[in-house]
Image (tube, helix red, strand yellow):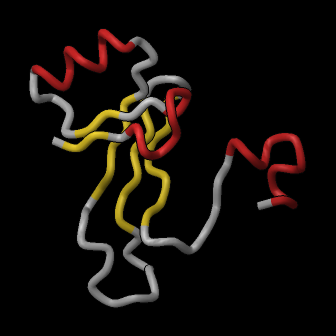
Amino acid sequence: AYKQWGKQDLPLHPTGTGPFKLAKWEQNSLILMERNEHYFKPGLPYLDKIEWRIMKDGVTRATALRASSRTSSSCARCAGPSATRSI
């Protein structure tokens, strides 16, 4: 990846061998990860995909949670991972 993209653009083109692969990225809006069918542990991961919607506004996050369009919310700036709430 380094040879193809160079030092400057490497962060924009993630690579790896983890359980999920990047399917879609819309900066400041959406991150979609899909199951890596070549993952070395057979049968894993259990999920087909994970979708993160970036909502910077607290009111927008709260409204999405109340409308049941989201199953969790976190505020990375607030208090770190302990600020995550699952419903």
Determine whether 18 is above or below 34 in the image.
below
Quarter of the N terminus within the rendering: bottom right
Left or right placement of residue 67 versus residue 44 in this view: left
Q: Quadrant of the C terminus?
A: top left
Location of residue 69 in the rendering, given as x and y in whole percent from the top left corner:
15, 29
Instruction: Give how far across and how far down residue 13 sits, in percent.
Output: 67, 49
* x 31%, y 33%: residue: 73
**47 over 79 or under it: above or below:** below
Query: Relative to the observer, which residue lies in front, 13 or 30?
Result: 30
Going 31% across and 80% down the picture, which residue do you hit?
44
Expressed as whole percent of the image width and height from the top left, the position of residue 4 reads 81, 56
In which quadrant of the rendered view does residue 63 lie?
top left
The quarter of the displayed image where residue 61 is located: top left
Residue 76: horizontal and vertical position, in percent?
51, 33
Please tell me which residue is depicted at 42% across the width and 27% down the height of the picture: 54
Establish if 81 lies above or below 56: below
Residue ranking furthest to the left:
67
Residue at the spot x=24%, y=72% of the render? 46
Is 47 left or right of 31, judged from the image as shown?
A: left
Question: Left of 59 or right of it: where is 3?
Answer: right
